Each structure stands twice: as structure tokens, then as C-alpha cells.
Image: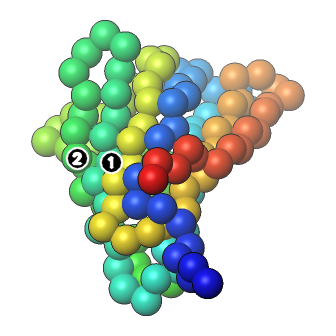
Amino acid sequence: MNNQKGEKHWIIPDGYIPPLSSGELISHESICILNCNGQDAKLEVTIYFEDRDPIEKIPVIIQGKRSKHLRTTELEHNGETIPTGVPYSIEVESDLPIIVQYSRLDSTQPGLALMSTMGYPLK
């Protein structure tokens, strides 16, 4: 029986942080990561854009047997961050198998929308 929970390489092709919000909630996106392993998982997150070079290998640690909801606005590497209003894609690489989900809260209208989907695992 294969007891591995998750994969080491994940892709999320649709990213977009709305530049405006309405009401009390701020539009945002999160990479939701589950590490079922007993030890910390060392991740590298790369952000790809349509019209500029990627932000490569942003280091992230997910503690063992923990979950983390990482807002994409918090990702930063060498002073670079993801701008609002710009489409992007996400690559997540880990030294241990993990599970990756992606969520977006769009509060650009009073009738806000919440979307969530699993990342695409590469084997």
C-alpha cells in the first residue's frame, strides 16, 4: 500500500488579485498547503507572468503535520511581490509530498464570490 500523502510538484495556472474591494472583506488569494509528514516541508514557490520575468524560488517552510493558508500578497522575494490586477500562475515545489489547494475571495462586488480548487499535481 502506498502511504504517500500528496505530491512534490504542483501547478496553479490561474492567479489574479483584484485591485479593488468593496465592503469589509478584502479580495485575496491563498495557496492552502497541507503537510501530513512528521518533518517540515521546504517549498519553493515560483510566480509566472504574461509579460515579465517570473519571481523565482520564493522560500516557504510548512511545519510537519500542519496546514498553512499562505496569502499570495504575502509572497516576497528580493523585494519583488505579486502586483494586483495582473494575471499570474503559480508553481509549488517541495522536498516532501504535500497537498495544495487554491482559494480566491473576490469582493469587488457586494455579492462577493469565493472560489476554491485543487492544484494540479505533477508526478
Q: Which residue is mark 2?
A: 57
Identify residue for label 1. 45
| Position in image of residue 60 (x %, y %) | 31, 61
Instruction: Tell me the residue at 52%/76% (across/down).
Output: 4
- In this rendering, would 122 be left or right of 45? right
Query: What residue is rendered at 68% in x and 44% in y?
Result: 117
Q: Is residue 8 above or below residue 2?
A: above
Q: Does residue 73 appear in the picture of this structure?
A: no
Residue in the picture at 44% in, 69% down: 97
| Residue 58 pos. (x, y %) | 25, 49
Label 2 SS: strand
Q: Residue furthest top?
A: 51
The quarter of the image holding the N terminus is bottom right
The x and y percentages for residue 66 are 51, 78
Which quarter of the picture shows residue 28?
Answer: top right
For marks 2 and 1 on the same chain, the one whose residue lies earlier in the sequence = 1
- The numbered disc on residue 17 is none
- Residue 57 located left or right of residue 100: left
**Which residue is most to the left?**
78
The amino acid beneath tag 2 is Lys
**Front-lying residue, 31 or 109:** 31
For label 1, count other residues whose C-alpha is less than 10 Å away and answer few (under 14), some (14-19) or many (20+).
Answer: many
- Callout 2 touching callout 1 (CB < 8 Å): yes
